[in-house]
Image (tube, helix red, strand yellow):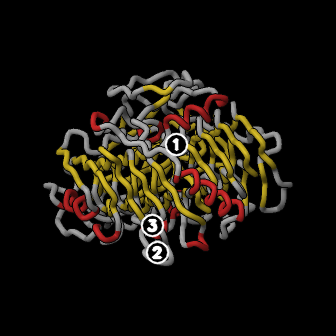
Amino acid sequence: MGRRSPSTRLQAALAALAVAAATGVILTIPEASAAVAAGATGYASQNGGTTGGAGGQTVRATTGTQIHAALCGRASSSTPITIQVEGTINHANTAKVSGTSCNTAAGVIELKQISNVTLVGVGAGAVFDQVGIHIRESSNIIIQNVTVKNVKKSGSPTSNGGDAIGMESDVRNVWVDHSTLEASGGESEGFDGLFDMKDNTQYVTLSYSVLRNSGRGGLVGSSETELSNGFITYHHNLYENIDSRAPLLRGGTAHMYDNHYRQLNESGINSRAGAHAKVENNYFEDSKDVLGTFYTDAAGYWQVAGNVFDNVTWSPKGTDYNPAGPNPTSNATVSVPYAYTLDSASCVPDVVARTAGAGKGLLVSDGSCTPQSPSPTPTATASPTPTATASPTPTATTAPPSGTNLSIGAGSDGSSKADGTSYGNVRDGNLSTYWSPAGTTGSVSVKWGSPTTISSVRVREAAGAGTVTGWRLLNGDTGAVLATGGAAGTATFPATALSKVTFEITGATGTPRVAEFETYA
């Protein structure tokens, strides 16, 4: 785990930045830019995309209670809604509101067990002051043009476990854009992470945002054995005056490009426990140990290209400390399934300074190192590296495949499991043992130590339990969807080399029992 107390450098820099803020200019977003601009990028554009409240009602809120009331006033928990926020949201004006379409709590903005919501700052801006935003068991969420500051987990008042934005428990498709997340110290001052994901959170993008003045930037995965999170993109963000976790990755795949990292005081991108990070065209400045595996001997991996290291210092390697420098090179190949355009790392500090954070008019970059107004209907551009693609017409069939079941002898993990069941039961060749999710949905994966080519899978259910009614098959390396279907059975798709394949149950009549998750070349 990362070092827990904030460094002396963090406190000194906070004082200096406070003086600068006192003489700075407060920026506001013009009313004409109130609507959510452009579309989700990175991994948030995958898995069906992230559209938030598009197509639904638009309402205004000036208090946290009004935000909760807007959620609770919908016809259902999935009715699309855009909530335009203006003013300061704090504990005094954030109360619990009850309803059949919401599950809220006082002292925190609770986006729990809901979907299809956009929260966007408008007018003079939206500031969540000591009130965190908690996303739990939810999907298709957009948070844009907001400031969240000084959220505490200890002291008074407390909110959201000390996270500015925290996601946990089966969260899918979240896009946080043009936002400012900040603290005023580290754990000893009562703060925790600025942008945390755990307990099966996937398909998230953080773009054009500022994270600063915190002991912890954010994590993906709460422990070395909690590896159900991933497919995260970070681009055009400023990490400034952060001690560590920029971010901390435990398992999963993450893509960092065109970010400006300044004053990472102890460590930066911490890829560990099998995580894979694609690190491209970032600008690292006045920092220490900006990439590697830190505070553990559970190795992580990275692919690096086009980065600038400006006044970066590196520590010697140790048994539980493995910096990537002083001359970082790739130790893995990491592919992503979406198109993107890179700005040159040399112009990243300028572009990020002009675009990142709340109140910047939602300006973006098109790869020309020049900020642009966002297009309402952005077009895809060619990726500078090969991208993984899914079959356009994956098929589910009933005929069992032939050949050797490659799952026998492989590894396995998953998002959740019911008491008394095991992930390993799906690859033991025994139909009397099984894995069950904790509820009616969840995921289980088969994985190998090196890329293995497969072109079909067969999922066999045990008798006497709920029946699967919907599922997706995912490339665990890239997040690409290989196939979808209703009832469990056999699926075929173009031959794909991968290290991990995931069977995700999206619907069932009860608690499923997956006896075998077979894979074939």
Identify the mark nearer the N-term, 3 or 1: 1
**Residue occupying the point 33% across, 43% down:** 485
Is label 3 in contact with label 1 (beta carbons under 8 Å)? Answer: no
Is label 3 in contact with label 2 (beta carbons under 8 Å)? Answer: no
Count of numbered circles on the image: 3
Q: Amino acid at mark 1?
A: Thr
Considering depth in this image, is 389 or 345 the residue closer to the camera?
Answer: 345
**Residue occupying the point 46% across, 70% down:** 161
Considering depth in this image, is 103 or 57 the residue closer to the camera?
Answer: 57
Q: Where does the image place residue 500, in percent across and percent down from the top left?
A: 56, 47
Q: Classify residue 162 as left or right of residue 467.
A: right
Which residue is farthest left? 75
Q: Amino acid at mark 3?
A: Lys
Q: Where does the image place residue 190, in percent across and percent down from the top left?
A: 54, 72
Quarter of the image with the N terminus in it: bottom right
- Please indicate, yes or no, whether residue 409 appears anywhere in the rendered image: no
Identify the element where label 3 is drawn: loop
**Residue occupying the point 53% across, 26% down:** 341
Q: Classify residue 156 as left or right of residue 376.
A: right
Q: How far is mark 2 from mark 1, CA to CA?
A: 35 Å
Q: Nearer the viewer, mark 2 or mark 1?
A: 1
The dot on residue 417 is: 3
Considering depth in this image, is 93 or 141 the residue closer to the camera?
Answer: 93
Q: Classify residue 170 as left or right of residue 316.
A: left
Identify the mark nearer the N-term, 2 or 1: 1
The dot on residue 233 is: 1
Label 2 belongs to which residue?
420
Q: Amino acid at mark 2?
A: Gly
**Residue occupying the point 45% across, 77% down:** 156
- Check disc 2: other Cα within 10 Å, few if <14, some if 14-19, many if 20+: few
Is label 2 in contact with label 1 (beta carbons under 8 Å)? Answer: no
